[in-house]
Amino acid sequence: MKNADGEEVGTLIADIPEGAFLASSSDANIQMDVQADAGADGVLDRVQQQLETNGEAGYTLNNYVMADVTFYVNGEKQVPQQPITFTVKGTNLDSQKAVAFSDDRQNNPTFPDVTEVTTEDGSKALQFTADMDSETSVFGVTEALQDKEWSTQVGNATVKVTGTEDALPEGAQLTVSEITAENEKEAIENAVMEQENDDSAVTNIVAYDIKFMMNGQEVQPSSPVQVSVDSPQIVSDQDTSVYHVDENNSVEDMDGSVDADGNIVFDAPHFSTYVIVQKGENAVNVTIQHYDATKTTDTKIYADDVRRLPVGGKINDYTKADNWTVDHVVQVIDGTSKTLTNTDKIEVNKECTIKVYYTPKTTTVDGATTFYDYTVKVTTVEPFGALLNHLTHPTAAILNEKAVKESGDSYGQHPVGTGPYKFVSWQSGDKIVLEANPDYFLGVTPIKYAIFRPVSEASNRTIGIETGELDIAYDIEGLDREKLKTDNSIVFLEEPSFGIDYIGFNTKKAPFNNVKVRQAIALAINADDFIIAVYKGSGEKANSLIGPKVFGYTTDAKAWEYNVEKAKKLLAEAGYPNGFKTKIWVNENVERRDIAIILQAQLKEIGIDVAVETLEWGAYLDGTARGDHDMFMLGWVTVTGDADYGLFPLLHTSSFGGAGNRAFYSNPHVDELLSKARVSIDQDERKELYREVQIIAQEEVPYYVTAYKAQNAALQKNIENFKLKPAGHHRLYGVKFKEN
């Protein structure tokens, strides 16, 4: 057995009783396919929930081994008619705390009894017997550790620590003391306040030294624990932060929050000093605007600055650079303008706008001064008709050269951008935290913090929406999609996208270098099976490599109609009357694997024997880029909404391999049409050229598009201004919560 990262975590042995499978002969070939479960976290969540439903609360699932198991009899999937005894060996699981489970992702998980056994080689193993009610089920064993709580009183506050029973040694004692020594407290508070850079009014700050002691020695938890602080000083509706401060006064944001009971809660992987900071509402927003004083009308030279200051706070720094001189400053309060005489420290007591007018310096150390110019001029070596659409690519960004050079290889963990949100933190596999950018040129977005969580298990995205844990969830799948569409407590959005899924053929290898073979396969495919069984109706039959929402799409290209007899005839004309054997590659994607299995059965009808091979993502990309494959499955999103982006990479000879054309399709006439369309600035001409390309590509079938995929999102009813974007990169600027 391997985990989702491909690491060996144990061996799974199945003891199959006689008569467990329906077979035509006694020498039937029975195979067990064991796949690493990519949705491990989702399965464990279901297991945890079911344990609690069964009355076994207060446990944390710690270590685990699990896998997707499918049985094949003579190459066909089959569900065993009798319980199967599974033995799991080669793990480090504690047999005394082990819980076995079976989950088909349709019903609630079940928990067969698990025992420790001795195998033939003398090693210890875990064994359980379970029914299998579907073609593929998840089987696994996990440790269920009893939760434990430690609590102590410090002043008028109660501090509780919750973790698993083995998080700390038996006999460890929780000790908490408030840091009150002035010199120590001042150093800690100064370090923390450097993190609180939004200029809000701080109403409360308290530092605790939290530790566990045993035999006079400090001990640290072996796994993260949760800390809860109940104090009358805590105000539940105030902005709250929690920081860990080490002995060098280095500060780490612990992502603390106030729970429903008004307690401060945060996860703590280690102990020492923790600081709680609360900010109240006795602060005001101040907008600082920057104008060229030499102009007769107000002309901005830089984006606005928005600051939040305590009432009575002072602004003593409002300049943007050293290449100008402040001419005068105007303060606007409630629509009334007043020119300020003292601008060294501008005191603010109400929300206001500070308008700063500058005159450029005639010289600097670098020479003459020019103001910021908002005009961007782009020069190309030749005409490019798709330029404007390409510039809208959602992932395009203007990078700060200084930040990139200073961060080097770690720039991805410390990004600097110009969007409505700025980067706060990234916890790999857990979440990304963004904060509203006060300098955004369109103004500050209403929601201060946006937290993105990767929830790989589709059912868990649904649960998160239903429970209110998530505000917005993308890509609701299968039966959950149908359920949420009719849930009046949820807003469900679904629209066509720019995305496609396709089956590709390596056209430089026989037999796929024969267009009649590719056409025969296209005729033998019933795309409705994919749309119904895999996409659950969330897709449309395709007639092109680009969809209706893409510029340049045409209805003149025809979708392939399902016709097995015609397919057999074409295959015979191609020289393969009895079919042939081949392979299709898929990556570790459940939908693509399911489509490949359906395709396997469909092509069997015309004599083509298809073996499905699942590759790790990196190996998959490298292999298809080299052309090692026969057939393969991938997707493409025309994110710019322009046919050039959807057709040129997939069809042009210059795009062989990793650039996009993994079918290695080459047609000189198609190359000519695509190149001509690229340099034309006549949009009607481009449409006609792309129309012809689509007709040819559909006829020659280097790719078979399985469906035009729809995109969706589920959101809470208190979310306003959220809209789906066809490229799948949904804009959160302006999204806000409804006011009560």
Image (cartoon, rainbow, N blue to C red):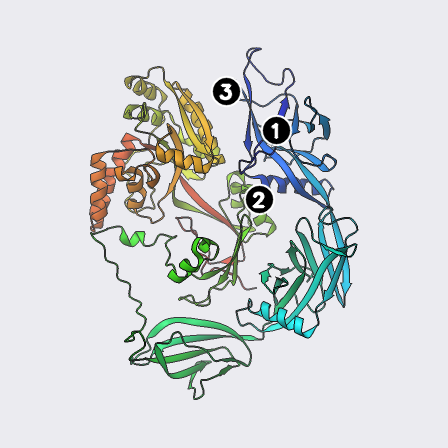
Q: Position of residue 707 (x, y in %)?
A: 39, 36
| Amino acid type, callout 2 | Asn
Q: Are marks 2 and 1 in contact (CB under 8 Å)?
A: no
Q: In the drawing, does residue 255 fall left or right of residue 152?
A: left
Compare marks 1 and 3 and give the one earlier in the sequence.
Answer: 1
Q: Are marks 1 and 3 in contact (CB under 8 Å)?
A: no
Name above or below for residue 739 compared with residue 488: below
Local packing at callout 3 (Cα closer than 10 Å; few below 14, some 14-19, many 20+) is few
Rendered residue at 29%/24% (across/down): 516
Q: In the drawing, does residue 532 fall left or right of residue 161?
A: left
Rendered residue at 75%/60% (across/down): 175
| Amino acid type, callout 3 | Gly
Q: Position of residue 352 (x, y in %)?
A: 47, 78
Which residue is denoted by mark 1 in the rendering? 11
Query: Within the image, what quadrant is residue 700 found in?
Result: top left
Question: Which quadrant: the C terminus?
Answer: bottom right
- Element on which disc 2 rests: helix
Which residue is denoted by mark 2 in the rendering? 460
Compare marks 2 and 1 and give the one earlier in the sequence.
Answer: 1
Q: Nearer the viewer, mark 2 or mark 1?
A: 1
Q: Nearer the viewer, mark 2 or mark 3?
A: 3
Which residue is denoted by mark 3 in the rendering? 75
Q: In the drawing, does residue 528 fall left or right of residue 26?
A: left
C-alpha gap between disc 2 and disc 3: 32 Å
Q: Position of residue 220 (x, y in %)?
A: 69, 53
